[in-house]
Image: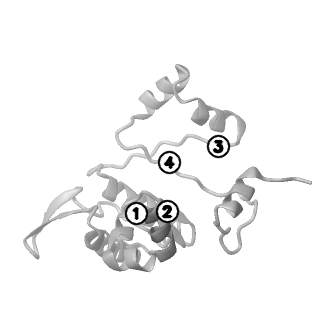
Amino acid sequence: MNVSRSRLAAKLLGHKAPKGASDRPGLIMLQIDGLPRTQLEAAMKKGRLPFLSRLLEDRHFSLESFYSGMPSATPAVQGEIFFGCRGAVPAFHFLRRETGRAVKMYEADVATEYGAMLSEKGGPSLIEGGRSYSNVYRAGAARSRYCAEDFAPNEILRNLHLWKWLLLGLV
C-alpha cells in the first residue's frame, strides 16, 4: 500500500484535493523577487539552499530562466507569466492618469481590477483552476491564499469562519 504523507497531512488539516486532481505531472512556480539566477546557483553550490537543490536533483524539477523585460515589478511579471500580457502595469506603485489616483498593486481593489482586465485581454490564465499563494493576482485559481485580491473586505467576510475566530479569541 502506497501512503502519501502529503495527502494524509492535507486531509488531517481539512484541505481537499481539487476536482480532477491526480498524480499527473503539474507545474510549480517559485518566483523570488530580485534574485538573479547566478546568485541562486552560487547559493546552491555553497549548500545554502539544500531543499531546493534536492528538488532539482531528485524529483524531476527543472530550473528555468524568465526575462521579465521592463518594468520588472512583480505585478508586471505575474501579468506576463499568468496571462501572457507584456507590460501589464507600469510599476508596483504608479499614478493612474484617468483618475489622478496613486495606486499600489497590493491594494485589493486595484489588484482585482487589473486581474480582471488581464483575464479579459489575455484569456484564461496559466493557473486557471489551480492554486495561487502570495501573488498579486488570483489569476483564475480555484483556491488562493494571501494574494492581494484576497484582502478585499468582501473576500475577507466570505472566508471568515466564525468558530475559528472564536476559538482563536479564547486561546
* Secondary element at image label 4: loop
* Secondary element at image label 3: loop
Look at mark 1 in the image and give the residue it sits on.
Answer: 147
Distance of mark 1 from mark 4, alpha carbons?
Answer: 14 Å
Mark nearer the N terminus (4 vs 3): 4
Whether residue 14 sits left or right of residue 67 in the image: it is: right
* Secondary element at image label 2: strand
Whether residue 110 sits left or right of residue 138 in the image: it is: left
Kind of residue at disc 3: Phe
Q: Are marks 2 and 1 in contact (CB under 8 Å)?
A: yes
Look at mark 2 in the image and give the residue it sits on.
Answer: 132
Q: Which class describes the residues within 10 Å of circle 1: few (<14), some (14-19), or many (20+)?
A: some
Distance of mark 4 from mark 3, alpha carbons?
Answer: 12 Å
Q: Which class describes the residues within 10 Å of circle 2: few (<14), some (14-19), or many (20+)?
A: many
Look at mark 4 in the image and give the residue it sits on.
Answer: 30
Distance of mark 2 from mark 3, alpha carbons?
Answer: 19 Å
Q: Mark number for residue 61?
A: 3
Residue most extreme to the front = 170
Kind of residue at disc 2: Ser
Q: Nearer the viewer, residue 19 or 155?
A: 155
Mark nearer the N terminus (1 vs 3): 3
Q: Position of residue 164 (x, y in %)?
A: 50, 69
